[in-house]
Amino acid sequence: MFARVLNGHSPPHTNRVHTITYDNGLEFAERQQMANTLSAKIYFANPYASWERGLNENTNGLIRQYLPKSKPLDQVTDKQLKIIMDRLNHRPRKTLGFKTPHELFCKKKPLYPVSRKWTI
């Protein structure tokens, strides 16, 4: 999945990623590749300690608005991944003072308003 997201490109803003906290799931089989690519330290959350991964748990909930648990991830297209990524990165967040992650991370205004349509 990580390789699909990168799509052969170096990830932008690698100098801003310092640590990555994983849980112990199989979905992180490419964790070492991701850490090496981003030059980041890896940490593992304790089993059944979701509070150690608060942002991750919140983001999973946001992703589930687009991809239900019943949807096999190998059936998600690159185009769908990009749409989900763009929508989440341009969605205002209460914890960010109702600014978007894109707006704060890239120091730019949102590219487009957020749609209330949750399916892709």
Image (cartoon, helix red, strand yellow):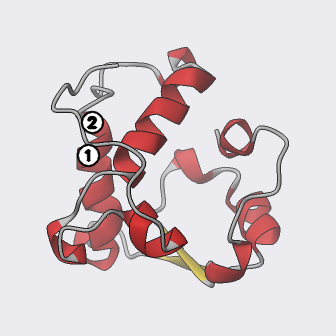
The residue closer to the viewer here, 96 or 60, is 96
The residue closer to the viewer here, 55 or 51, is 55
Q: Residue at x 53, y 15 (%)?
A: 75
Q: Do labels 2 and 1 touch, CB within 8 Å?
A: yes
Q: Amino acid at mark 2?
A: Arg
Q: Amino acid at mark 1?
A: Leu
Q: Locate the N terminus and report the quarter of the image it occupies.
A: top right
Residue 99 at x, y percent in the picture:
27, 68
Name which quarter of the figure residue 18 lies in: bottom right
The tag on residue 86 is none
Mark 1 lies on a secondary structure that is helix
What residue does disc 1 label?
62
Residue 86 at x, y percent in the picture:
46, 42
What residue does disc 2 label?
64
Q: How many marks?
A: 2
The residue closer to the viewer here, 63 or 111, is 111
Mark 2 lies on a secondary structure that is helix
Q: Residue at x 70, y 79 (%)?
A: 40
> How far apart are the alpha carbons under marks 2 and 1?
5 Å
